[in-house]
Image (tube, rainbow, N blue to C red):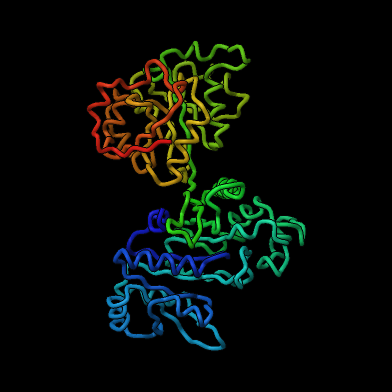
């Protein structure tokens, strides 16, 4: 995945880079990527760069150059660094307040700002006066390098370790642990200090390996970081890679549709205690919990009290669709989606009778989404489609405008041009009543994206 896709950039963005472990390299790499795509890219710093880093940029100009000179440089070079004075081997940037003046006078597509200092170290907590983020910033990218893992928590290896020690009681000189990165990155007084209230926040975990144990550590850091509603996504990757973002981890919720209408015809049977001790509905919910999905909602209608009793031991939230008799599936979706936190980026939807759902399938769906290979994902075995399906938030509003009589199959057909089919190899996921027959499948267009193992 390229940076622009992972960061969801649009013309007019002001992007500030904070943290440690690759800020300058990330800003430069993103600038070249956008310039190659035809964007007019301005860059600057509100702190300082080393003088030899000027060579990383195609062109540099003083920040007090005329708007005409800056515009001409953008037309010729596409990617231009603006700076203030150069002295003592450092290049200093203008004050953050300068940003508004520049945005009003120069015809650039995006402004990239290095807004923090870390002395080349892989991880940091800010000192007083740091970072220096322009108030007009629309996206803050907090950088941390996984090279910090295992390093001693001291001034030689970590920037301002004293702030972490005083806030969380980390042991000085002990090896840095994965949860420590997440705690600092999501902390309002540390990793999120100075972030404008309206700005999006994204974390970039630099130097993530393509596979292995440390890749798993990065996923754990991402999951813990996303407990903060301020953080919209965590990108795992390496600035130096050709496809520099391996995964984009975002908060995903899940709706188990148990309202008692056509989506759940056999609710009584699903509430009966099975041989293993739990009921089928609880077993479905447990599979979602094992998949590390934090925001699970059971949408109830008929038999709400019995459903709540069946899953009480799991601590899962239930929400009642009071319009379940007349509102159909769409009313259940409206109830469930409305109960999810605003930072949830996508939702897994499945009927409660899908009792043989496997964690393996959920993992495949979430991995496809994290790799950027689809945001409306439908599992398929040969020509047969099933649930759960993953639907990104951007489709929710349109989905809720559909007729109340539609079912999941009709929702898939409505969004057919956006569907990514995920080829799977587990017969156990398919249940009578939730499989689209081959005749229905043939009317879905052949041009739909297709992914699989």
Q: Can residue 178 be seen in this snapshot?
A: yes
Left or right of 149? Residue 233 is left
- The mark tally for this picture is 0
Of residue 89 and residue 71, the one placed in the foreground of this image is 89
Q: Can residue 105 be seen in this snapshot?
A: no
Of residue 50 and residue 94, the one placed in the foreground of this image is 50
Q: Is residue 429 above or below residue 130?
A: above
User: At 57% from the left edge and 72% from the top edge, which residue is drawn?
Assistant: 117
Left or right of 406? Residue 131 is right
Q: Is residue 408 above or below residue 225?
A: above
Q: Quadrant of the C terminus?
A: top left
Of residue 107 and residue 52, the one placed in the foreground of this image is 52
Left or right of 361? Residue 402 is left
User: At 32% from the left edge and 85% from the top edge, which residue is drawn?
Assistant: 66
Residue found at the far bottom of this picture: 87
Q: Residue 164 lies in what quarter of the image?
A: bottom right
User: At 50% from the left edge and 55% from the top edge, which residue is drawn?
Assistant: 237
User: At 32% from the left edge and 24% from the top edge, which residue is drawn?
Assistant: 407
- Which x, y percent locates residue 390? 41, 35
- Which x, y percent locates residue 204? 51, 57
- Which x, y percent locates residue 17? 49, 66
- Which x, y percent locates residue 360? 51, 31
């Amino acid at each position: 995945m390229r940076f622009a896709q992972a960061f969801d950039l649009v013309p007019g963005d002001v992007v500030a880079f904070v943290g440690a472990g690759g800020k300058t390299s990330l800003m430069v790499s993103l600038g070249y990527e956008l310039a190659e795509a035809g964007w007019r890219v301005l860059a600057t710093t509100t702190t300082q760069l080393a003088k030899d880093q000027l060579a990383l940029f195609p062109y540099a100009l003083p920040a007090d150059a005329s708007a005409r000179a800056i515009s001409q440089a953008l037309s010729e070079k596409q990617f231009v660094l603006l700076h203030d004075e150069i002295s003592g081997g450092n290049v200093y940037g203008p004050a953050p307040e300068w940003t508004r003046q520049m945005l009003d006078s120069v015809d650039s597509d995006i402004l990239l700002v290095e807004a923090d200092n870390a002395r080349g170290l892989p991880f940091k907590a800010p000192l007083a006066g740091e970072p220096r983020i322009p108030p007009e910033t629309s996206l803050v990218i907090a950088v941390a390098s996984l090279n910090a893992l295992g390093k001693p928590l001291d001034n030689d290896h970590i920037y301002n370790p004293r702030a972490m020690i005083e806030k969380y009681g980390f042991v000085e000189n002990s090896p840095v642990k994965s949860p420590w990165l997440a705690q600092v990155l999501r902390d309002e007084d540390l990793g999120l200090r100075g972030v404008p209230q309206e700005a999006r926040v994204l974390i970039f975990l630099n130097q993530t390996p393509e596979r292995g144990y440390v890749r798993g550590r990065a996923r754990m850091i991402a999951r813990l970081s996303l407990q903060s509603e301020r953080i919209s996504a965590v990108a795992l990757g390496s600035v130096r890679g050709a496809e520099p973002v391996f995964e984009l981890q975002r908060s995903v919720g899940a709706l188990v549709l148990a309202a008692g209408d056509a989506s759940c015809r056999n609710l009584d049977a699903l509430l009966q205690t099975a041989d293993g001790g739990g009921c089928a509905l609880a077993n479905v919910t447990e599979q979602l919990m094992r998949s590390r999905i934090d925001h699970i909602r059971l949408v109830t209608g008929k038999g709400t009290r019995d459903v709540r009793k069946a899953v009480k031991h799991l601590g899962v939230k239930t929400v009642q669709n009071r319009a379940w008799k007349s509102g159909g599936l769409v009313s259940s979706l409206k109830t469930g989606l409305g109960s999810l936190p605003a930072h949830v980026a996508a939702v897994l939807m499945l009927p409660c009778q899908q009792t043989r759902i496997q964690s393996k399938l959920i993992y495949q769906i979430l991995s496809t989404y994290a790799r950027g290979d689809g945001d409306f994902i439908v599992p398929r075995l040969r020509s047969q489609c099933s649930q759960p399906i993953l639907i990104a938030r951007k489709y929710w509003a349109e989905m809720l405008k559909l007729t109340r009589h539609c079912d999941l199959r009709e929702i898939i057909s409505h969004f057919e041009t956006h569907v990514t089919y995920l080829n799977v190899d587990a017969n156990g996921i398919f249940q009578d009543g939730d499989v689209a027959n081959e005749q229905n499948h043939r009317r879905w267009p052949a041009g739909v994206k297709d992914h699989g193992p």
